Amino acid sequence: MSAATLLREILRPIWVAARHVFFKPYTYKYPYEEIPNLPSENYRFDPKQGFAYPGFKGRHLLILEKCTGCSLCDIACQNIAEAITMVYAFDVIIEAEEKDYNEFASGRGVLSELLDRVVEGFTRPLVEPGPGTGGSHPLLGFFADLKRVVKADGKASIRLNSDPIWEHNSATLYSNYLDEQFSQLEKSGWSFSILEDKFPDAIVYGASKNGCSVKIIIQKRDLKYPQNKKSYFPQVDYGRCVFCGFCVDACPFYALEMTPDVELSSISRQGLVYNPYMLAGPKISTNPPSTNPIDAFYGWLRAKLGR
Ligand code: SF4
Ligand code: SF4
């Protein structure tokens, strides 16, 4: 072999490798970058048209305007994965004397103790499923919305959440989220009693301490869907779902579809439970930002090259 051939044989692979530095990268830094041409890229949220991609079994889309609450999807899932739970929308309202509320608003009185405990109960993570729940139920964005306090006849009604809380019934909601909080409050001098029990639709508790007397009202919210007068909808636990699609086939009203969204991972067990509003809404997951400068460079390069 001549020296020129030898040099060419040595330099050619180096050149082949080196010129790739200037090529558009063919790989994607998933999950930091969206992968194009995957069906998830085409995710569209249009419940009115009831879109679906036949044959693709990703996250469900619930069309609230079509769902009648018939539970057939839940029944279909019972022998598969028990991933569906039918849930009602509940509100939690604290009704206090206006004088007690005014004290609370100015940073005094004992009402804040009760409010803090109730809010804490609804925001604490449920690691284990509660009794009879068939799954844990996350509560997203639960807060005491003090702008929504309604005052009338010397009373103040504080609605504690803007989104409904999803549960099977009023008693489960209490046992999952308030039981422990009420026990803690009893140790600090609060006394509780059931004033009205309209199980499974509503429960009203009375609570008092130091002359402050309040009602804790757990009641079903009417979501005003005429075809679903009970406001009863499916909730899906993606920690259990095997994406078989039987629930979609079972729905006689075409209210449940499967979308191409497969990016459902979560760092918490509760994050895998999608309540009816989450199922009816757009894709939730987003690509996490990369902390690696090389990934950032490739992201920049891909954006520049329009790929
Ligand atoms: S797709 Fe999931 S929720 Fe539907 S029936 Fe199958 S396991 Fe149950
Ligand atoms: S999604 Fe369909 S099957 Fe399930 S409760 Fe609603 S209407 Fe019935």
Image (cartoon, grey):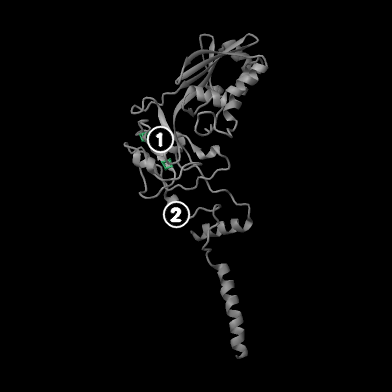
Image quarter for ligand 2 equals top left
Residue 7 falls in image quadrant: bottom right
Amino acid bearing label 1: Asp
Indicate which disc residue 38 carries: 2
Q: Is mark 1 on a helix, strand or loop?
A: helix
Position in image of residue 71 (x %, y %): 38, 32
- Front residue of 260/4: it is 260
Give above or below for 269 relative to 180: below
The percent position of residue 132, horizontal first and vertical second, equals 50, 29
Place of residue 261 in the rendered image (x, y in percent of width and height, measured from the top left): 45, 47
Mark whose residue sits in front, 1 or 2: 1
Q: Position of residue 26 (x, y in %)?
A: 51, 63
Question: Which residue sits at x=31%, y=37%?
Answer: 252
* Quarter of the image with the N terminus in it: bottom right
**Rendered image quadrant of residue 188:** top right
The answer to which of marks 1 and 2 sits earlier in the sequence is 2
Q: Does the residue labelled 2 lie within 8 Å of ligand 1?
A: no
For residue 74, which numbered disc appears in the image? 1
Instruction: State yes or no: Cβ of the residue under disc 1 lies below 8 Å from any atom of ligand 2.
Output: yes
Q: Which secondary structure lies at badge 2?
A: loop
Kind of residue sitting beneath label 2 = Leu
Which residue is painted at 46% across and 55% down in the image? Answer: 36
